[in-house]
Image (cartoon, rainbow, N blue to C red):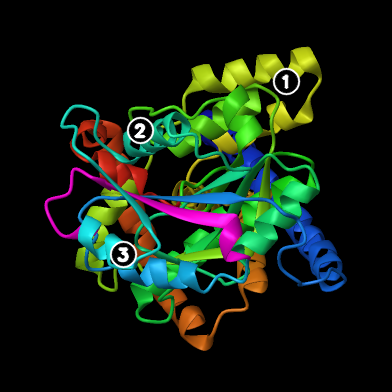
Amino acid sequence: MFIVYALRWSLLAMEVLIACPVLYLCVISVSAILTDKRRRAKTASLSSTAGDSGFTFAILIPAHNEEAILATLLESLANLVYPKNQYSVYVVADNCTDATARVAREMGWVNVYERFDEVKRGKGCALDWLLGVLEEEHFIYDAYVFLDADSVVVPTFLQSMARELTQGAQAMQACNTVLNGSDSPSTALRLIALTLMNHLRPLGRNGLGASSTLTGNGMCLSRSLLMRCPWQAFPFLEDYQYYLRLVEYGERVRYVPEAVVRSEMPTTFAQMRTQDILWEPLAPSWRIALRLLEAGLRSRDFARIEPVAELLTPPLSIVTCCCLLTFIASLLLWWLPGLLLSLMLIGGVMLYVGTGLYLLHPPRAVYMALLHAPGFMIWKLWVYLVIRRSKKVTAQHPWGLAKRGQIQ
């Protein structure tokens, strides 16, 4: 009997521990729904005319052997509904061995730079180098947009960013999502995952007065911000680390859902495997979390404290797995309090995922892809365990890590 009581109380302790991230996700979900309704009403009342703001933009595109796909992005940038004399496009062909630079030059209106450095490699270093070159050549802009070469943007992308700059925003993140979400179960599940991480969470966090994360693709930083807090080429996940640095210094990243950037995703499980290993981040640093918590408490700034919860929230696959395990354990122990609490935890996860689907309004094919979710979750658990055991991936794939668009 003592063993049964010990197991029940251990189970309860585990459920309380899991309840912390689940409760956080539920709060974010409710905030996202309310914020979405407010933004839709506000956006509908704003004028859609271009060029009223007068802000100038430099669009920076780091490209490594992207000759096959770069033209698609450049064509979408040529169709931007924004005065042509108020934005310029810069492509840095970074350590390329193909015709990436030639493809960009053939457009006729793209500024192309070539960079060769076998020591300082990767997207972060390429952007740091390009920003330095623009400063040296005295090409000054009000804001700088960062785009991946395998993306496309909506025509009103710069309009949306200019509107946020007018309202005082200094760091902005576009809606970074999937271009081919209906092509296969793999892309559909990726669309759901990116909706949760790159749309629901930043929308809800902004609604709470906190900061959005930076996902690397679709970032927009004002010149004044870059002067105060220069871009740094971190060893890996430079966008996320730069976001943490901004938050620590009291800056807030504003999420701009109307500015949409889409990228193509792998359509098969075999193609998805390598990308998942490259995208999956390392475990969050307790040192960073404690530093943010200390800074937030000292300044009494909620925007610095909230990222601690985001930073320490486990991947959804782990949270879901833990909820299911506690449910099974409650059944085996036949303990009603534990069973009820485990059902509440599962309901919280369902609320989070359901909110993402509500905000996404996906086609039927995306809902059908949920049948493949258990296998996808098991795969994500395996990837997470592999990354935890082998951190050499950060040094081996600098460009692959730079292109991650999710933390799931």
Numbered tag placed on residue 197 in the rendering:
none
| Region in magenta | 83-100
- The residue closer to the viewer here, 345 or 188, is 188
Pick whichever of labels 2 and 3 is earlier in the sequence: 3
Determine whether 102 is above or below 155 in the image.
above
Element class at badge 3: helix
The residue indicated by pointer 3 is 70
Does residue 96 belong to the magenta stretch?
A: yes
- The residue closer to the viewer here, 184 or 67, is 67
Residue 401 is left or right of residue 290, and the answer is left
Element class at badge 2: helix
Q: Amino acid at mark 1?
A: Gly
Q: Is residue 331 visible?
A: no
Q: Amino acid at mark 3?
A: Leu
Numbered tag placed on residue 296 in the rendering:
1
Pick whichever of labels 1 and 3 is earlier in the sequence: 3
Marks 1, 3: nearer the viewer: 3
Mark 1 nearby-residue class (10 Å; few <14, some 14–19, many ≥20): many
Mark 3 nearby-residue class (10 Å; few <14, some 14–19, many ≥20): many
Q: Quadrant of residue 35?
A: bottom right
Q: Residue furthest bottom?
A: 364
Q: Is residue 307 visible?
A: yes
Q: CA distance from mark 2 to mark 3?
A: 20 Å
- In percent of width and height, residue 335 lies at 62, 48
Query: What residue lies at 22% left-to-right and 37% top-to-bottom?
Result: 393
Residue 52 is left or right of residue 288, and the answer is right
Query: What residue lies at 88% left-to-right and 71% top-to-bottom?
Result: 45
The residue indicated by pointer 2 is 129
Determine whether 65 is above or below 235 in the image.
below
- In percent of width and height, residue 15 lies at 60, 41
